[in-house]
Image: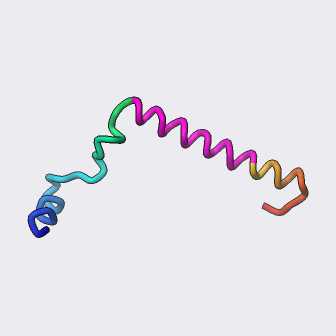
Amino acid sequence: MKNMINELWHGNIVPQSDSRTNSPEMKELLGYMARLDEEREELSQQIKREEGGEI
């Protein structure tokens, strides 16, 4: 455990460089997911406005 902390401290381990999210395919999928989440939120707000509800 102490060795892992030292490795993190000295920058030898970079948690953000998870190999599962570094592939071009995964980056593309994450982009789609983010876009669709934004669209879902916009539609949700639009429905609330049409129903006369507060946002």
Report the quarter where the C terminus lies. Answer: bottom right
Q: What stretch is highlighted in magenta?
A: 25-43
- Residue reaching furthest to the top: 24
Residue ID at (90%, 58%): 52
Residue ID at (27%, 53%): 15
For residue 25, what is the image quadrant?
Answer: top left
- Residue reaching furthest to the left: 3
Residue 16: x percent and y percent? 31, 50
Q: Does the magenta stretch include residue 27?
A: yes
In screen coordinates, is 52 left or right of 35?
right
Q: Magenta residues: mostly which secondary structure?
A: helix
Residue 1: x percent and y percent? 13, 68
> From the viewer's perspective, is residue 6 above or below residue 23?
below
Residue ID at (61%, 45%): 37
> From the viewer's perspective, is residue 6 above or below residue 38?
below
Residue ID at (89%, 54%): 51
In screen coordinates, is 35 left or right of 55?
left
Q: Which colour scheme is used?
A: rainbow
In screen coordinates, is 25 left or right of 34?
left
Residue 3: x percent and y percent? 9, 64
- Residue reaching furthest to the bottom: 2
Q: Does the magenta stretch include residue 16?
A: no
